[in-house]
Image: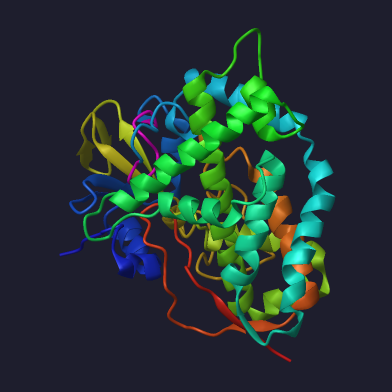
Amino acid sequence: MFTFDPYSPAIDADPFPYYKRLRDEFPCFWSKEADMWILSRYDDISRALGDWQTYSSAKGNLMTELPNRAGATLGTTDPPRHDRLRGLIQKAFMKRNLEALADPIREIAAAAAAPLAGEKQFDFIEDFSSKFTVRVLFAALGLPMGDERTVRDKAVLMVQTDPKTRAKGPEHIAASDWMRDYAAGVIAERRANPQNDLISHFSMAEIDGDRLDEREVLLTTTTLIMAGIESLGGFMSMFALNMADYADARAACVKDPELLADAIEESLRFNTSAQRFRRCVTKDTELHGQTMKAGDFVCLAYGSGNRDERKYENPDVYDISRKPRGHLGFGGSVHACLGTAIARMSVKIAMEEFHKVVPNYSRVQQQLPWMPSSTFRSPMVLELARMN
């Protein structure tokens, strides 16, 4: 009997054979282990993303949600409340000119890559990407330096799940509580002393007299820190994994760094870190001969939709010339990730600087330790070896 347990270490390691069976045989599948439906085909996921009236985010969008988060963040609200939140936060993003961040991001990347010059083997995550992503996030949000390692460790814990209990454990809840307290302190300081940073801008953002309330500011800040570290850091590690595994693609990107932009898009399709997100159906819904009842949770398996043969030719081939329009690497529709521009720019600049120092490399471990998360997929360690 076929089962699909998104909390399983086997699926963390390689979900794609399971996804193919889901798409081909069980496109609307009830997972007893997850206690929710699994949608695996691109068109079904895309339609669900656009039909927020039926597939609601208001009860949370993480596969295993954190307490008291639903209903106060961009990812956990539906229009029109979502549109209000997005408008206010987008206004803050617009004030922080992304182009002005390009030079500081390059400086951060170069500084993070420099110590690798003499290294024959290193952990890409510990020795490069984690340092880079945390420093970029701190620069963009205007977070005070000094707590970088603790903030990163707490953010990574927040997105994890206990694979045995299929729930958030005490350590995950404690990390979330710590992050809220940390964010509350930063918000209070920024309101007292506003600066040209994202937290100052969106805590003060106003449209027609409307502002974010205290809970919205707090949970939005907490989510931005969590997503900024884990989403960006997780994707960077997946991108480096693809570059290590596909030597021709890596060589092409080293020779012509402008190709990194296309390689990033293909990696977002081929191996995105954002694998699965949750919705709740608001009414009885028929799909592929199954009836999803009002109140049932539904998993939108982005990672499966991105490998759907009905959408992409030869989807299991990593092809940086593909230009995969419509991929689900950043979600879609009203819930498309707000930080896509800064994420794309950051990863491109980071890998440009990394390749200046380490142009040729391979991965050391064939079996990787994967982060236990039912929502995200990325390695905990990525050992790379320099090649001549």
Which image quarter is the C terminus in? bottom right
Magenta extent: 56-65
Which residue, as the protein is rendered here, is positioned at the far bottom?
A: 388
User: Vertical placement of 373 versus 318: above or below?
Assistant: above
Between 24 and 333, the one lying in front of the other is: 333
Between 290 and 330, the one lying in front of the other is: 330
Which image quarter is the N terminus in? bottom left
226 lies left or right of 386 = left
344 lies left or right of 60 = right
Between 287 and 108, the one lying in front of the other is: 108
Between 343 and 298, the one lying in front of the other is: 343
Identify the image's colour scheme: rainbow, by chain, secondary structure or one colour: rainbow
- Residue 329 x, y percent position in the rendering: 54, 51
Quarter where residue 263 is shown = bottom right
- Residue 76 x, y percent position in the rendering: 43, 32
Q: Main secondary structure of the magenta part?
A: loop
User: Vertical placement of 360 versus 41: above or below?
Assistant: below
Q: Does residue 64 belong to the magenta stretch?
A: yes
Q: Give the residue displayed 34% in from the left and 41% down from the top.
A: 65
Q: Give the residue displayed 18% in from the left and 51% down from the top.
A: 32
